[in-house]
Image: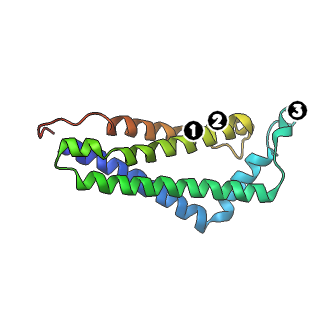
Amino acid sequence: MLVRLSKLLLVASVALFATLVVFNNVVDYGTNFAFVHHVLQMDTVFSTDQAAWRGIASPVVHHIAYAGIIGWEALIAVLCWIGSARLWQNRHDPKSFDAVKNIATVGMVAGILLWFTGFVVVGGEWFLMWQSKEWNGLQTSREFALILGVIAIFLNMPERSRNVA
């Protein structure tokens, strides 16, 4: 039971984290919008970079991208809140607990897709965020993706059929 509670608390922690990220991005829209703007515009990559043509100068596209990021973060929060509620409802029975991990797992994967694929792969490699001293979120994004991956692995370890801590 203790291991199941640990799993559900970690999923709830991710839900809380994603909720706070959405809240901060909405309440302080301009601060994190500037990050998206500069990464997409590629205005802080090396001045001699031959790939700077990939930059997107349209503020409309920047706002759409940022709204998409916020929406995706909200999706992560909702999936993880629902997932943690379902885990809570089934915490006493290992088989039932195992059976309802899917929504929480999708929430973890959605987070990995955002912070690894979205920020590390697309932001870091396509828009060359790694070249920017001011607008480089690679380290933080990798940390988020890694944490979510570890939680997803732990969450999906099979439950024991007897009540062992």
- Identified at 38% across, 52% down, the residue is 13
Mark 3, secondary structure of its residue: loop
Res. 128 mark:
none
Q: Can residue 13 be seen at all in this image of the molecule?
A: yes
> Residue type at mark 1?
Phe
Report x, y in % for residue 115. Answer: 56, 43
Alpha carbon of mark 1 to alpha carbon of mark 3: how far?
27 Å
Residue that numbered label 2 is attached to? 121
Report x, y in % for residue 70. Answer: 59, 57
Q: Is residue 74 above or below residue 11?
A: below
- Identified at 55% across, 37% down, the residue is 142
Single out the mark in the foreground, 3 or 2: 2
Res. 48 mark:
3
Mark 2, secondary structure of its residue: helix
Residue that numbered label 1 is attached to? 116
Alpha carbon of mark 3 to alpha carbon of mark 2: how far?
21 Å
Report x, y in % for residue 46. Answer: 82, 36
